[in-house]
């Protein structure tokens, strides 16, 4: 379990490093109202997704440009990030070819290819505030055959809680 949490944290740190590379004159993240995943994703949605709302771990701050929350489930760990950075900024820094369209709960996002660890899936959704990122990492004690299938299943209840 610690290894999976480290994988999620490492993936988050890698993305945070990527995100911190440039501001490009964009509006400061502190001036935008970010979606707060720990408050915005409901307990009912979390339970339907198969994660325990009581396992909530908050991270990130608006001043750092991120709001982040993580929960633990029987088969996977779920982390939701919120930032004012745009999808176009992520694509320009990583290369648009690093992403592929991926629809979850009727909302099209962009799946990041080359997941940072085996057994994980990472999808970014555009929002008025910037991007909402959903990451699922399989629990090594209860591995699922496909982390993106797990993300899609969890996302059926989680993604509708995300702002437009």
Image (spheres, rainbow, N blue to C red):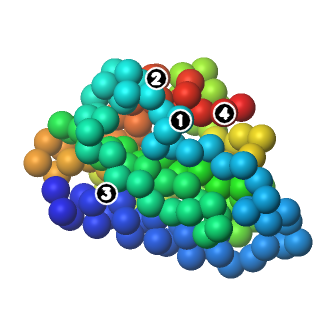
Which residue lies under the disc numbered 2? 156
Is 116 placed left or right of 7 in the picture?
Answer: right
Q: Is residue 86 left or right of residue 100?
A: right
Q: Nearer the viewer, residue 103 or 162?
A: 162
Residue at image location 59% in from the left, 33% down from the top: 162
Tag 1 and tag 4, C-beta contact below 8 Å: yes
Q: Sequence-wise, which precedes: disc 1 or disc 3?
A: 1
Quadrant where the image shows the C terminus: top right
Which residue is rendered at x = 73% and y = 62% of the image? 29
Q: Quadrant of the N terminus?
A: bottom left
Residue 95 seen in this snapshot: no
Q: Residues within 10 Å of mark 3 (few under 14, many from 20)?
A: few
Q: Is residue 163 above or below residue 23?
A: above
- Among numbered discs 3 and 4, the one appearing first in the sequence: 3
Label 1 element class:
helix
Q: Which residue is mark 1?
A: 40
Numbered marks: total: 4
Q: Which mark is residue 119?
A: none
Check disc 3 and report its element: helix, strand or loop. loop
Q: Residue 95, position in %: x, y?
A: 69, 64
Q: Nearer the viewer, mark 4 or mark 2?
A: 4
Residue 128 position, x and y percent, is 77, 41
Q: Earlier in the sequence, mark 4 or mark 2?
A: 2
Spatial separation of the CA atoms under disc 1 and disc 3 = 28 Å
Per the image, the residue denoted by label 4 is 163
């Amino acid at each position: 379990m610690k290894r999976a949490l480290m994988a999620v944290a490492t993936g988050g740190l890698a993305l945070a490093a990527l995100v911190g590379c440039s501001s490009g004159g964009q509006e400061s993240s502190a001036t935008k109202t970010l979606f707060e995943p720990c408050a915005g994703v409901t307990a009912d949605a979390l339970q339907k997704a198969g994660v325990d709302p009581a396992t909530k771990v908050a991270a990130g701050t608006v001043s750092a440009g991120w709001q982040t929350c993580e929960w633990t489930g029987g088969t996977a760990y779920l982390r939701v990030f919120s930032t004012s950075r745009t999808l176009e900024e992520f694509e320009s820094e990583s290369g648009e070819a690093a992403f592929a369209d991926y629809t979850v709960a009727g909302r099209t996002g962009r799946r990041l290819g080359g997941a940072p660890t085996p057994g994980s899936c990472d999808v970014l959704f555009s929002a008025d505030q910037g991007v909402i990122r959903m990451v699922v990492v399989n629990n090594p004690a209860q591995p699922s055959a496909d982390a993106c299938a797990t993300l899609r299943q969890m996302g059926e209840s989680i993604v509708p809680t995300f702002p437009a």
